[in-house]
């Protein structure tokens, strides 16, 4: 007795499921620099450069507005504790603008390392599903 159409449809569906799961897994473990041959990465770095220039301009603008809001006069800025607080805020914001892409890549690298190195996760998602029917003797 041959396979029934139900079993063959289930096997085809499970095969498609396994293929799509393998494709998702490869996307999760691929770096942004190698995705689609690096073309997408080139566009992203170009956009990042433009946005970084805009970010620096906004950083200076909002820093000046923040100084004016928090200080009634420039005499308050002369106090060391207030000047240090303003400097730290400016340095953190500049670091976020300057190294935002590197921080994002570091997070991607950490998460990809966790996904690739965790064996029980890998085995849980790479299970090959199949449907078999045993013929019963009648």
Image: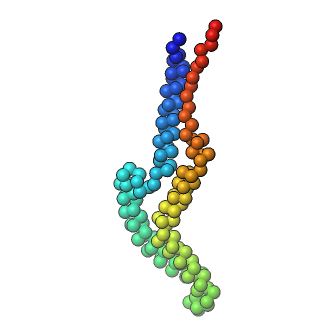
Q: Position of residue 19 (x, y in %)?
A: 48, 36
Q: Residue at x 57, y 79 (%)?
A: 88
State the residue at coordinates (35%, 54%).
39
User: Residue 12 at x, y = what percent?
Assistant: 49, 27
Relative to the observer, which residue lies in front, 33 or 136? 136
Which one is in front, 137 or 18? 137
Q: Could you tell me residue 69's position as x and y percent?
A: 58, 80
Expressed as whole percent of the image width and height from the top left, the position of residue 113 reads 54, 55
Task: Name the residue rendered at 51%, 73% in the picture.
Answer: 95
Q: Quadrant of the C terminus?
A: top right
Indicate the quadrant where residue 136 lies: top right
Q: In the picture provided, is 32 more to the left or to the right than 84? A: left
How many labels, in total? Answer: 0
Q: Return the residue nearer the eye: 52 or 63.
A: 52
Q: Which residue is located at x 47 percent, y 46 percent?
A: 26
The answer to whether one can see residue 58 in this image is: no
Left or right: 111 in relation to 47: right
Left or right placement of residue 33 versus residue 107 in this view: left
Give the colour scheme of this rendering: rainbow
Residue in the foreground of this view, choosing between 127 and 85: 127
Q: In the rendered image, is residue 127 in sight?
A: yes
Q: Is residue 75 above or below residue 117?
A: below
């Amino acid at each position: 007795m041959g396979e029934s159409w139900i079993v063959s449809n289930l096997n085809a569906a499970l095969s498609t499921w396994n293929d799509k799961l393998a494709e998702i897994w490869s996307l999760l473990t691929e770096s942004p620099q190698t995705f689609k041959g690096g073309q997408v990465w080139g566009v992203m770095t170009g956009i990042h450069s433009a946005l970084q220039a805009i970010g620096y301009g906004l950083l200076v603008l909002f820093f000046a507005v923040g100084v004016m809001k928090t200080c009634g006069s420039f005499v308050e800025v002369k106090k060391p504790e207030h000047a240090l607080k303003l400097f730290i805020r400016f340095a953190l914001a500049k670091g976020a603008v300057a190294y935002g892409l590197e921080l994002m890549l570091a997070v991607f690298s950490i998460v990809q390392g966790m996904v690739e190195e965790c064996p029980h996760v890998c085995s849980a998602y790479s299970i090959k599903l199949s449907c078999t029917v045993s013929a019963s003797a009648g």
